[in-house]
Amino acid sequence: MATTDHPTPAAPSGLSTDQSGASPPRLWFVDNLRILLTSLVVLHHTAIVYSGLPLWYYTEKPTSAAVGLGLSVFLLVDQAWFMGAFFLLSGYFTPGSYDRKGPRAFLRDRLIRLGIPLAVFYFVLNPILCLASYRGGSPLDTYLNTIGSGPLWFVLALLVLDGTYAAWRLAKRPPRNLKPRSPAFPAVIGFVLVLALATYALRIVIPQGFWVPVIDFPTSAYLPQYVSFFVLGTVAYRRGWFHAITARTGWAGLGMAVGATVVFLPLALAGGADAWTGHGTLSSLFYALWDSTFAVGVVLALLTFFRRRLNAQGPLRRYLSGHAFTVYVIHAFVVTAAGYALSVPALPTSAKFAIAAVVVLPACFALAGPIRRLPGVRRVL
């Protein structure tokens, strides 16, 4: 999403833009991938509305158990990888931004482009979204109980990670870019195993579904994935992985995702609900192996596919990628409004979800343009 600057990856020589003196070509395929990820965020939260899970500002109990199960499966598969992919892309463009701007301008830019939308959502927009469903006491109590980051928890996490990166750069010598080379497959497997074990260990302490208080962080059980993918993105920038990734690596990633689903997921589901929640069970270990392998495999496959097949933009894709971050910020209002509007007609859940998905996603992108044209908004969004 557009929380980062204009993509400035390593130049073909392995030098950064500043070092080589030439501006490298924009990674259009990354912009196109960001469109897909942003669209999945909108559809993900639309699915929550009709899944029966009490995880959104407005929800409905599904009229069919089969539809509810199908939506839940979609949510679990989505959750396994798509936010990790966002962190990977964000991490990839962080070193170049820091190199060009230096620590002070870099942090100032992050506070403006991430901090302002987060603060407005946290203290203004989230309470408005919660008003219709919250049953509290005094107006002050109601307000204090409805402030929160909502779906902008991702922006909060990015602020923390960007600040940590800046502190690390201040304490270390500037790293140098290396000659672009596709990541070695044994290193990929090693990363997956370490990520799976870290995820399994964390879920013993913080099981799935545990909501971290104060900072309003909803998916803490995926913290190892989010942090490691962000770090991996910064490494990928220095090593030119996005330029050098091969078709063979992409096919290997697809094989990893399919193989993990065939082998690890059935073993995990055999253990019942503990597979998803955690608690240190054998089934939760298999689940951690599945979602870690699946996440890495899907991201490798998509990066390769988009680089080879979708590495260009016309006017439509340019509009969509340029407004992706605005869509992320505003989509909660559109998804929630659609949920309330569709609560009136007596339709089956499958029909409501289909209608909402068809209407909400284009509406978010259509609204993003006028919103960004408001005075001062484009500087932030």
Image (cartoon, rainbow, N blue to C red):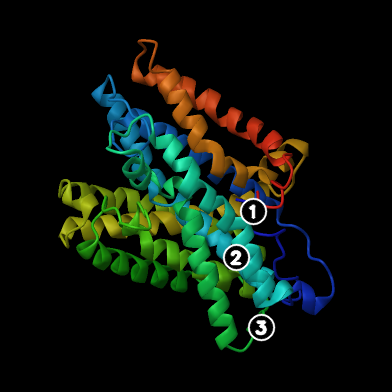
Label 2 vs label 3: CA separation? 15 Å
Label 1 vs label 3: CA separation? 23 Å
Amino acid type shown at disc 2: Tyr
Q: Examine the rendered structure and indicate whether residue 113 appears above or below residue 124.
A: below
Residue 28 visible within the image = yes
Amino acid type shown at disc 3: Arg
Asked where in the image residue 126 lies, by quadrant, the reply is top left
- Whether pointer 2 and pointer 1 mark residues with C-beta atoms closer than 8 Å, the reply is yes
Q: Secondary structure at mark 3?
A: loop
Q: Secondary structure at mark 1?
A: helix
* Residue situated in front as seen by the camera: 70 or 302: 70
* Residue situated in front as seen by the camera: 162 or 149: 149
Query: Crowding near pointer 3: few (<14 within 10 Å), some, many (20+)?
Result: few
Amino acid type shown at disc 1: Val
* Residue situated in front as seen by the camera: 364 or 95: 364
- Whether pointer 2 and pointer 3 mark residues with C-beta atoms closer than 8 Å, the reply is no
**Going by the image, does 62 lie left or right of 26?**
left
Of the image marks 2 and 3, the number of the one nearer the N terminus:
2
Residue highlighted by disc 2: 92
Give coordinates of residue 342: x percent, y percent: 42, 18
Give coordinates of residue 231: x percent, y percent: 50, 70
The disc at residue 30 is 1
**Going by the image, does 263 lie left or right of 250?**
left
Q: Look at 71% across and 50% down and name the residue there.
A: 311
Residue highlighted by disc 3: 176
Q: Look at 35% across and 10% down and name the residue there.
A: 346
